[in-house]
Amino acid sequence: MRKYICSVCGYEYDPEVGDPDNGIEPGTLFEELPEDWVCPVCGATKEEFEAAS
């Protein structure tokens, strides 16, 4: 599962962990996140995330 990095603050979305504080279950791929999901650290939109290399 590919991780994604917030280009604004550096937060790393790890699909194996999810975002349980915001109702995102572990195992949720980045592509499956709701369109209105935002970075839990800085509030950046999904468009501001880049795939980790």
Image (cartoon, grey):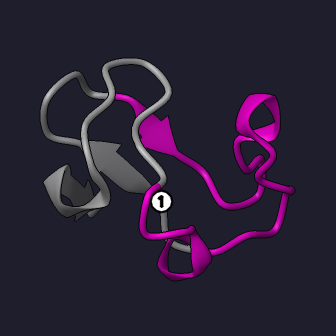
Main SS of the magenta part reads: loop
Q: Nearer the viewer, residue 27 or 40?
A: 40
In the picture provided, is 49 more to the left or to the right than 7?
A: right
| Magenta extent | 11-36
- Residue depicted at 82% across the width and 38% down the height: 20
Which quarter of the rendering shows the C terminus? bottom left
> Horizontal placement of 37 versus 50: left or right?
right
- x, y percentage for residue 46? 30, 58
Residue 30 magenta-highlighted = yes
Out of 45 and 49, give the one closest to the viewer.
45
Residue pushed farthest front? Answer: 36
- Residue 8: image x %, image y %? 13, 29
Q: For mark 1, give the secondary structure.
A: loop
Q: Position of residue 11 (x, y in %)?
A: 38, 29
Q: Relative to 2, is 48 above or below?
A: above
| Amino acid type, residue under disc 1 in the picture | Lys
- The answer to if 14 sits in the magenta stretch is yes
The spot of residue 10 in percent (x, y) is 27, 27
Please name whichever residue, 36 or 41, is drawn nearer the observer in this view of the structure.
36
Quadrant of image for the N terminus? bottom right
Instruction: Give the residue pinned by disc 1.
Output: 3
Residue drawn at (57%, 69%), measured in percent from left and top? 33
| Residue for point 44% across, 39% down | 12
Residue 47 occupies which quadrant of the picture? bottom left
Closer to us: 46 or 51 = 46
Q: Residue at x 85, y 57 (%)?
A: 26
